[in-house]
Amino acid sequence: MIVQLSAGSATVAEPDDCTRLHVATSLPADAVGEALLGSGIGRLEAGDALLDLETLRDRARAGAQEPDWDEKWAKMIDYARTKGWVTADDAAVRAHVEYGASS
């Protein structure tokens, strides 16, 4: 799952791939935080994106095709929890940002 971030939007590409999660953008580093906030999908913290779980799930689910997507999503988030990538309040998941990517 890839969150494609531009100045005006954040869309979820490859929503059925719940084996990876990152943000891809062609924006400069100093514009990513504002773009995450403006798109409503999350915020920037310590160089990583903190993606709102409810928003991410809704956007990914809307494009998903796999019949067992909900199970795959749950496994992805459970795995992220074991790594400490989900916030203590269970509201967001940490994802790295890949700069220079087409968005």
Image (cartoon, rainbow, N blue to C red):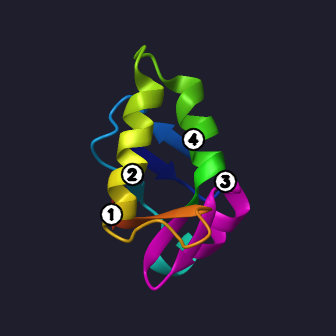
Q: Which residue is mark 1?
A: 82
Are circles 1 and 2 on residues that touch, CB within 8 Å? yes
Q: Nearer the viewer, mark 4 or mark 2?
A: 2
Q: x and y percent of residue 32 in the render?
A: 54, 71
Q: Nearer the viewer, mark 3 or mark 1?
A: 1
Q: Return the residue found at the far bottom.
A: 46
Q: Nearer the viewer, mark 1 or mark 4?
A: 1
Are circles 4 and 2 on residues that touch, CB within 8 Å? no
Sequence-wise first label, 3 or 1 = 3
Looking at the picture, does residue 56 appear above or below residue 97? Answer: above
Which mark, by number, is residue 1?
A: none
Q: CA distance from mark 4 to mark 2?
A: 14 Å
Q: Which residue is drawn at the image coordinates 48% and 28% (left, top)?
A: 70
Q: Return the residue found at the far left.
A: 19
Q: Amino acid at mark 2?
A: Asp
- SS of the residue under disc 2: helix
Q: Which residue is mark 4?
A: 57
Q: Which residue is mark 2?
A: 78
**Is residue 88 shown to the viewer in this render?**
yes
Q: Is residue 42 a member of the stretch shown in magenta? A: yes
Q: CA distance from mark 3 to mark 1?
A: 33 Å
Which image quadrant: the N terminus? top left
**Circle 4 Cα neighbour tier, 10 Å, few/some/many (<14 / 14–19 / ≥20):** some
**Circle 3 Cα neighbour tier, 10 Å, few/some/many (<14 / 14–19 / ≥20):** few
Q: x and y percent of residue 56 in the render?
A: 57, 46
Q: In this image, 42 relative to 49: left or right?
A: right
Q: Amino acid at mark 4?
A: Arg
Q: Which residue is mark 3?
A: 8
**In terms of depth relative to the viewer, which is nearer, 61 or 28?**
61
